[in-house]
Image (tube, rainbow, N blue to C red):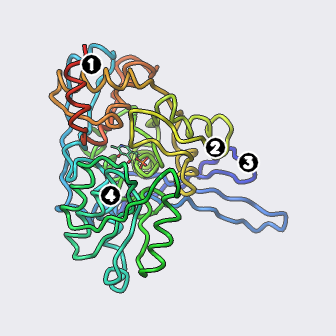
């Protein structure tokens, strides 16, 4: 068992044989404290590798196995071997479908019959709406009155009921808690939920199955569902992989939290990357990411727009702004050994038509 320093608790890594491939050794991480009387307390993180494997078993055949694309131009520009995991080609256009389908599949029969509720103005809403439709569950989505019409329409088309609220007057968590309690619905949180986190981790599971000798993994971080799941999977499969989370400069709650070693709350951020406009790291996702991710990198909105253009013109990949932040970081911030194999998560491709038109017109 390997041990690392941590405040109060020792962070321990236990190595064990992969049940799926007995010749592969896996590593899981947990926190342990030894008391004065010799007893020890174990504090486990919200998910472990097993949860990701179980999620993969649940969603295989339902989710798209998304492609991994490469570009010589981008390798040349960055000096790395870059592998893009293209979740813009996922059902609903983003990785969010993975966690949503996993979470809804694991509800009890009574919970399924009672229906679910969530709050989201974007991709999680669509992920829950489609999963609920496929599983025959009724879904209610709390959305702000100013959510993009295209996302509201897509959510409604999947058969979900939308409850609107004014974001200047009310807090979305309070609205969903109140409506959920009144109607007896089960809340499926967009990121602070073990089955959501584990489902999102299947992105890295697939990436490492296709590119096993990856050195670096870079992905966006909003609430942290995607990065917590992916880092759990990636660090277990390849303990020496280095993982970087990316935010935009104005939505820097994770960056600040890493600096201050506690969950920092920021005012509502103004950034083009609408998927990472969260104000505070998740309660469940933070300990996992703090433990497994090396660093949070910050990029500007301008760098995100350039990365979107590059993806569109060179790779013919349509990424939404949040889907392009990881490439923006690899192009402008990442400093690792030249020639490293770098996995980049393109997390989604749901771009507003007006933004796309502006992007194509800008030089
Ligand atoms: C396209 C896209 N990428 C990344 C994220 C961030 O995901 P998480 O909240 O799991 O960190 C989101 C969240 O909505 C998203 O829609």
Instruction: Give the residue at mark 2.
Output: 264
| Picture residue at 19% right of the left edge, 69% below the top | 134
**Residue on which disc 1 sits:** 75
x and y, in percent, of residue 66 in the image = 20, 46
Of helix, strand and loop, which one carries label 1? helix
Mark with earlier residue (2, 3): 3
The answer to which of 228 and 11 lies nearer the viewer is: 228
Q: Which residue is mark 3?
A: 7
Label 1 vs label 2: CA separation?
35 Å
Give 233 or 268, whichever is nearer the viewer: 268
Precedes in sequence: disc 1 or disc 2: 1
Q: Nearer the viewer, mark 1 or mark 4?
A: 4
Q: Which residue position holds label 4?
A: 125
- Whether the residue carrying mark 4 lies under 8 Å from ligand 1 is answered with no
Nearer the viewer's eye, disc 2 or disc 3? 2
Which residue is at the front of the view, 120 or 56? 120
Judge the density around disc 4: few (<14), some (14-19), many (≥20) Cα neighbours within 10 Å. many
Q: CA distance from mark 2 to mark 3?
A: 18 Å
State if disc 4 and disc 1 touch (CB < 8 Å). no
| Dot 2 crowding, Cα within 10 Å, few <14, some 14–19, many 20+ | some
Mark 2 in CB contact with mark 3 (< 8 angstroms): no
Q: Quadrant of the C terminus?
A: top left
Distance from Cα at disc 1 to Cα at disc 4? 35 Å
Q: Which residue appears at 41% of the width and 80% of the height?
A: 183
Image side of residue 261 versus residue 54, left or right:
right
Is disc 3 placed on a helix, strand or loop? loop
Residue shown at 32%/80% (left/top)? 112
Furthest-bottom residue in this view: 110
Q: Mark 4 or 2 closer to N-term? A: 4
Q: Secondary structure at mark 2?
A: loop
Disc with the residue nearer the chain's start (1 vs 4): 1
């Amino acid at each position: 068992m390997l041990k690392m320093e941590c405040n109060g608790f020792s962070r321990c890594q236990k190595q064990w044989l992969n049940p799926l491939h007995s010749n592969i050794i896996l590593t899981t991480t947990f926190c342990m404290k030894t008391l004065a009387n010799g007893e020890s307390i174990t504090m486990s993180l919200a998910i472990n590798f097993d949860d990701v494997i179980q999620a993969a078993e649940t969603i295989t055949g339902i989710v798209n196995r998304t492609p991994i694309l490469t570009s010589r131009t981008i390798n040349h520009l960055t000096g790395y071997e870059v592998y893009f995991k293209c979740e813009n080609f996922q059902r609903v256009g983003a990785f969010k479908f993975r966690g949503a389908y996993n979470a809804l599949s694991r509800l009890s029969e009574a919970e399924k019959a009672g229906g679910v509720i969530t709050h989201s103005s974007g991709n999680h809403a669509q992920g829950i709406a489609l999963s609920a439709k496929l599983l025959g569950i009724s879904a209610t989505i709390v959305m702000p009155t100013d959510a993009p019409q295209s996302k509201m329409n897509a959510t409604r088309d999947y058969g979900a009921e939308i409850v609107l609220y004014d974001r200047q007057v009310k807090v979305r968590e309070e609205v969903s808690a109140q409506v959920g309690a009144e109607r007896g619905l089960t809340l499926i949180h967009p990121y602070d939920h073990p089955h959501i986190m584990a489902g999102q981790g299947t992105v890295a599971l697939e990436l490492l199955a296709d590119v096993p000798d990856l050195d670096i993994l870079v992905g966006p971080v909003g609430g942290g569902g995607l990065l917590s799941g992916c880092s759990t999977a990636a660090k277990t499969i390849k303990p020496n992989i280095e993982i970087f989370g990316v935010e935009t400069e104005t939505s820097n709650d994770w960056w600040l939290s890493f600096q201050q070693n506690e969950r920092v709350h920021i005012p509502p951020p103004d950034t083009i990357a609408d998927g990472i406009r969260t104000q505070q790291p998740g309660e469940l996702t933070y300990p996992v990411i703090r433990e497994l991710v090396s660093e949070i990198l910050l990029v500007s909105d301008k760098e995100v727009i350039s990365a979107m253009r590059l993806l569109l013109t060179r790779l013919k990949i349509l990424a939404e702004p949040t889907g392009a932040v990881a490439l923006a970081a690899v192009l402008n911030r990442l400093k690792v050994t030249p020639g490293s194999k770098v996995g980049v998560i393109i997390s989604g491709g749901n771009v507003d038509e007006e933004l796309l038109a502006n992007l194509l017109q800008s030089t």
